[in-house]
Amino acid sequence: MRLSLTAFATLLLIAFLMGANHVAARFAFAHGVDVTTAIAVRSSITAMVVGLILWRAKVSLTLSPKHPRVLLGVGFLIAIQSYCLYSAVARLPVALALLGFNTYPLWIALWARMLYKHQPEPAVLRVMPIMLIGLALALDVLGASSGLGAQGQWAVIGEGVFFALAAAALFGIAMVVTQHEAGDLDGRLRTFSTMTCVAILAWLMIGTQTGLHLPDAAEGWMGLCMLSLFYGTGFTIMFTVLPRLGVVGNSAIMNVEPVFALVLAWVLLNQAIAPIQVAGALVVVSTVMYLGLRKRQG
C-alpha cells in the first residue's frame, strides 16, 4: 500500500517526536533528574492521555481470563525496558543508544523462535550480519575513530551498550508475547495497560528505593516537560491520526528516529560522531526499515 504525503509526513513527525524525547531526557538527566523519575512522569502523563483516548472512543474494556496476566507481564517487561533504554541514553550519545535499541527486530526473531518455534524469515537472516556490522561501525567498537583502542572504547561505552541491547531484547520479547497472547485486544487498550503498569512500578520504585529526583535547574525542568510532551504527543498522534489515514502504527518509516536524534543531539547537545559512525548508523536504520517495509508488503 502506497503512503499518502500526509501519512508519510505524520510518520516522520512521530519519529521526530520520539527522537526528540530522548534528547530532552539528556537535558533532564544533566540537571538532577534520575531515570526512574523521568519514566514515572513520562509514563503517567502518557497513560492519562491514552486513557482519555480510550474514553472518547468508547473502546471496549472486555478482557478474556488470560489477558490480565499477559498485560501485567508485558507491562513489567516494558518497565524494565524503559529503564534500560533511558539508562543507555544517559551513558551514550543519544543516537548510538537508539541504534543499539534498533536491533530489536533480531531479538523478535530470536524470541519467536525460542518461545513459539517460529522459523526466522529469510530476510531477517540475510540482513542480520549487515545490521551487526553497521552497529559495530556506529559504536566504533575497535576505538579507531576515538583513538582509544578497543579496550579503551569499551571502557567508555560498554555499560551503555549493555543497557541499549538489553532494552532491545526486552522490547523484542514483549512484542512477541503481545502479538501471540494479546493481539486480539485494541492497541489503545494494550498501550494504556502497559503505560499504567510502567507508571505504577516506577512510582513504587521511587517510593521504596530511589526517591524522587526533580530538576535542580530550569534546563532540567524544560527537559522533563519536553520529554513528557514529545512522548505523549507521539503516542496521541499514533492512536488518533494514523488510524484515520489507514496507516499501521509501527510503520518502518518511524525507524528513522535515530537519524532525527543524531541531528538534534548534534545541534543541541554538541554530540558529534565520526563520519564512519554516521555511515554505520545509516546501515542499521536502512536494514530495520527494509525489514519493516517487507513486512508491510508481505
Image (tube, helix red, strand yellow):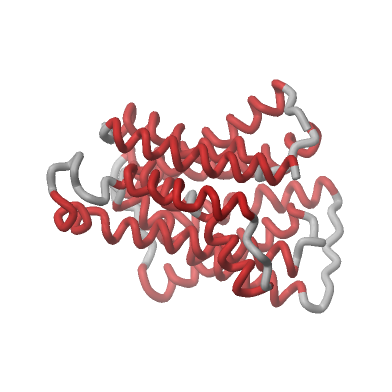
Which quarter of the figure has residue 157? bottom left
Q: Is residue 123 left or right of residue 60?
A: left
Q: Residue at x 71, y 59 (%)?
A: 190
Between 120 and 28, the residue placed more toward the observer is 120
Which quarter of the figure has residue 117? bottom right
Q: Is residue 284 left or right of residue 51?
A: left
Above or below 88: residue 70: below
Q: Quadrant of the N terminus?
A: top right
Q: Is residue 122 left or right of residue 65?
A: left
Q: Is residue 264 left or right of residue 8?
A: left
Between 225 and 121, the residue placed more toward the observer is 121
Q: Residue at x 29, y 42 (%)?
A: 217
Which quarter of the figure has residue 113? bottom right
Above or below 253: residue 100: below
Residue at the far top: name it.
5
Q: Residue at x 63, y 33 (%)?
A: 11
Q: Position of residue 268 (x, y in %)?
A: 33, 30
Q: Quadrant of the C terminus?
A: top right
Above or below 156: residue 239: above
Q: Position of residue 275 (x, y in %)?
A: 29, 30
Q: Residue at x 52, y 51 (%)?
A: 42
Q: Position of residue 277 (x, y in %)?
A: 31, 38
Q: Does residue 199 appear anywhere in the picture?
A: no
Number of marks? 0
Between 250 and 57, the residue placed more toward the observer is 250
Between 276 and 212, the residue placed more toward the observer is 276
Q: Does residue 255 appear anywhere in the picture?
A: yes
Q: Position of residue 66 (x, y in %)?
A: 77, 77
